[in-house]
Amino acid sequence: MASLFDAMFALLGKRGDDPAVLAFHAEHGLSAAPVLFVDDQLNPVEHPSDHYSVDYVAGLKRRGAYPPRREKGAYVSYVGGITLKPEFAGELADGVTTKLPYAEAKARAVEEMGNSFAKFVTLTRDDDREIVMVYKAKEPHGLREVRLQARELDDEDPRLAEWAAAMPQVKVRPRPKPGDVAAAANQDSPDALRRLLEVQADAGFGDDVDLELYDAWQEGGPEAWVGNADAERYFRVFGGDGSGGLLAFWLVEPRKALEHQPVVFLESEGKLGVVAKDLGDFLVLLANGVGPYEVIAYGSSSGTANDAVRSIADSCAAVPKGRTPVDVLREANVAYPDFGAWVMDLRLG
């Protein structure tokens, strides 16, 4: 019978929806693998009592898993690693346990690296996987954690560029003619936004949501962010985060009203994305305690429910009952997969 370690080690590099991964979660009482909406975050799923986490990433630098790609609006996830805490019980491999002293690990190492924070001692390695003991940098070098890792190519490996170049390119929609979105561009703030301003003034959107809504359209931000004055005609900025990000309607749907235009976020550090396909779906996000900055910066899809916003969402006939943030984000990315490329084209003139 395979040990827990053997079962863990076999998961490395597998897709999050692989039957073996799903079975492992079910057998060991782990919550579901996360749905990933950004490609640069480590997403651990903690075991409630056995002192380890299964760590998911969007893409791995290896054949068939690079570059990160979306299916049904979310990134394909992979088991990039499993992190064992010092309290983890049981043998790992060849007599190795979390009690292995640093000196013994160093004597058995196939590689050792370090910095001012930790010493990284690789005990075993093959083409696909490795075991890395992480000790404290200062004596007596107590164990910080053990990392079971899927091996990846170096960032400079030329195969990565080849695989990226072979990926199908997203077709970028044309820019609408001004007359096609004139009605949306000239529309006053929708009633739901005015009601959200009242919620903001009364109790806010929660400690986990970094968002300020504005009581009038803000100008100048799109031009500064994109580097093209023409950007002003395609965005209506109605909010932002504390660092200067822009929350806006993207005026890209010809002859549709403002509340039926997609809601996008342009983050101050350069990230961007569609957070909702319309205002109704944006209400669903806020009602569930999910802010636009948190979506684009961290891929958040859960938070603390906001009853005041929920009341607004429930009164909106366009919002189906039972809709979740994951539903919203999946559909937004399916409907508008070209937003990033569209903005880049605008930036280039």
Image (spheres, grey):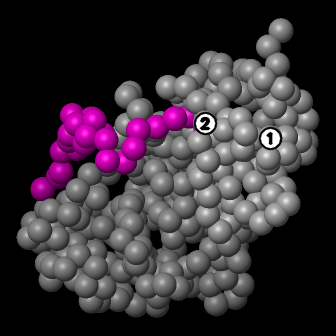
Quarter of the picture holding the N terminus: top right
In this rendering, position of residue 27 left or right of residue 128: right
Amino acid at pointer 1: Glu
The location of residue 244, given as percent across then percent down, is 43, 85
The location of residue 103, given as percent across then percent down, is 79, 47
Q: Residue at x 81, y 52 (%)?
A: 143
Quarter of the picture holding the C terminus: bottom left
Query: Which disc, if any, is residue 110?
Result: 2
What are the residue bounds of the magenta stretch? 147-174
Q: Is residue 261 visible?
A: yes
**Position of 258 relative to 16 (above/below):** below
* SS under mark 2: loop
In this rendering, position of residue 259 left or right of residue 137: left
The location of residue 24, given as percent across then percent down, is 74, 24
Could you classify mark 2 by the number of other residues whose Cα lies within 10 Å: few (under 14), some (14-19), or many (20 or more)?
Answer: few
In the picture of the structure, the residue carrying the numbered disc 1 is: 104
* SS under mark 1: helix
The location of residue 193, given as percent across then percent down, is 50, 77
Q: Say whether residue 124 is magenta.
A: no
In this rendering, position of residue 59 left or right of residue 111: left
Please say if the residues under marks 1 and 2 sit with CB atoms less than 8 Å apart: no
**Position of 40 relative to 14 (above/below):** below
- Tell me the quarter of the picture where residue 52 sits: top right
Residue furthest out toward the front = 107
Q: Residue at x 33, y 63 (%)?
A: 261
Q: Is residue 79 visible?
A: no
